[in-house]
Image: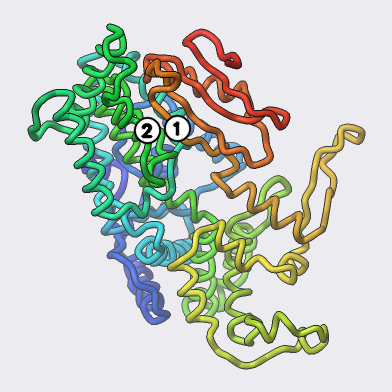
Amino acid sequence: MRSFDLLRSKPISGELLKLKDEIHQYAIDYGLDFYPVIFEVVDYDTINILAAQGGFPSRYPHWRFGMEYDQLSKGYKYGLQKIYEMVINTSPCYAYLLKANHLVDQKIVMAHVYGHADFFKHNAWFRNTDRNMMDVMANHGTKIRRYMEKYGQDRVEEFIDRVLSLENLMDTNVLFETSEMKRKREEKLIALEEEVAGQVDDRSQALKSFMRSKARNERVDSGAEVNSDDDFDQMAPTDDIGKRDVMRYLLEYAPLKEWEADILGCLRDEAYYFLPQRLTKIMNEGWASYWHSKIMTKKALRSSEIIDFADKHAGVMAMSRQNINPYKIGIELMRDIEYRWNTGKFGKDYEDCTDMVEKYHWNKDSGLGREKIFEVRATHNDITFIDEFFTEEFCNRMQLFTYKFNPRTGRNEIESRDFTTIKQKLLNSLTNFGQPLIEVESGNYANRGELLLKHIHQGVDLDLAYAADTMRNIHAIWKRPVNIATKQDGNDIVYCFNGKEMKPV
């Protein structure tokens, strides 16, 4: 990692260092609290490399990082996009400033970064984050490179491809798994290892998984004790936490080689590191944008910089024709919450008021706005944030609507301005990031050692083409048929992938 830093980045100095100290003090004065933030200056090629690798200087080698770097580079070359900043959720936080930015840009970025750093430290969904992930990622990269040297790059990369196709099959409850829960799960696995291997030692989790699954698979393949109450009965999730954690289930029970289990464990750790950021994209960007706007307009902005700031800020807040801008929705909701709690526009009295004129001019001068937004940033994720604070008044003021493609005109057209429809569509897009919810039901389906998954149907049928590709990858790891229970056209149905094709059972 340090060789990368020495060659491609350098600590801030001179005027940038003075600006950093100034912005830092403003953030502290406003009540923001964060781990130390280390700013480094990089050129655009370097920031593209960092962005392609999730912000980390040292990752395992994989073609997707090169693909994302190529896309980012072309986007910059053709003037389609520009990365202004990047901040990493670690302790200390690392933040990268683009060398080519003007000083007003650097001010905005620094204020924005301190907002992110405060959010990372205090939001509940980041509570169990490994703050040493910079070193962890580098260690993962070293491990995987060694496996590539030993077993061949193509073989290892193919396994990584299969695992990465499962990184959205996660359980958000795992983020709140307590030490006691982890201890009980580990005790259960140790008991299973004693039964299967007849021994207990300090082997790594990867080796334990390998030995356990190897013994289990040998019994399945030989036909011995398939119908008895052996470790198959212990392979069904017995608690709510982990039922949707497909990667952990495969790590614990699939017939993995030692290096495969090790890589799967590494990639799962990385997926759960990034999960809170995916769950709080709107809130996180809204919070950071709120504070860069507040710090700049109230404290740090000089009169000669007003036009530049307005231009940059407006560019970031511009709404896309295709997608919701998390920066815009986030900052406006934070401002709306602050305004409502400052004026008392909340609670039973306000909700029960039927006089629209009185409601419009309602002002109890409560002064609770700042306290409320700090509370919200600590306790919510995007779904609960939208569900609780996305009001009809806010929706109308933002002039939001839903749209759909009209094949007759060949254009996207307004479908509805109804508040309930808009809010529901927004929530649907955020629930599991718009992807299907999958749970593990059994590792011994039909008493044949087959894996059974369950699709939690929420009104949208499973895309069978995507499902087949995913089940093919799971089959390659599980080494036996993979089944999924779902609904199609309102009817319950189970599909099975046997290694060659997916078909209904």
Could you say which is closer to the camera, residue 251 or residue 311? 251
Q: Are marks 2 and 1 in contact (CB under 8 Å)?
A: yes
Q: Quadrant of residue 364?
A: bottom right
State the image coordinates of residue 282 (x, y, percent, origin top left): 55, 57
Give the amino acid at mark 1: Glu
* Secondary element at tag 1: strand
* Secondary element at tag 2: loop
Q: Which numbered disc covers residue 138? A: none
State the image coordinates of residue 484 (x, y, percent, origin top left): 53, 25
Q: Which numbered disc covers residue 441? A: 1
Q: Residue at x 24, y 29 (%)?
A: 262
Q: Which numbered disc covers residue 236? A: 2
Does 258 sit left or right of 291 as displayed? left
Q: In this orientation, does residue 49 appear?
A: no
Q: Quadrant of residue 410?
A: top right
Give the amino acid at mark 2: Ala
Does 256 sit left or right of 329 as displayed? left
Does 475 sit left or right of 301 as displayed? left
State the image coordinates of residue 154 (x, y, percent, origin top left): 34, 14
Q: Residue at x 38, y 25 (%)?
A: 443
The image shows residue 268, relative to residue 223, as above or below, that is below
Q: Residue at x 18, y 35 (%)?
A: 191
Could you say which is closer to the camera, residue 503 or residue 203? 503
Q: Residues within 10 Å of mark 1 (few under 14, many from 20)?
A: many
**Quadrant that contains the N terminus:** top left
Looking at this view, name the residue that lies furthest to the front. Answer: 228
Looking at this view, name the residue that lies furthest to the right. Answer: 408
Does 359 sit left or right of 298 as displayed? right
Q: Marks 2/1: CA distance? A: 6 Å
Looking at this view, name the residue that lies furthest to the bottom. Answer: 365
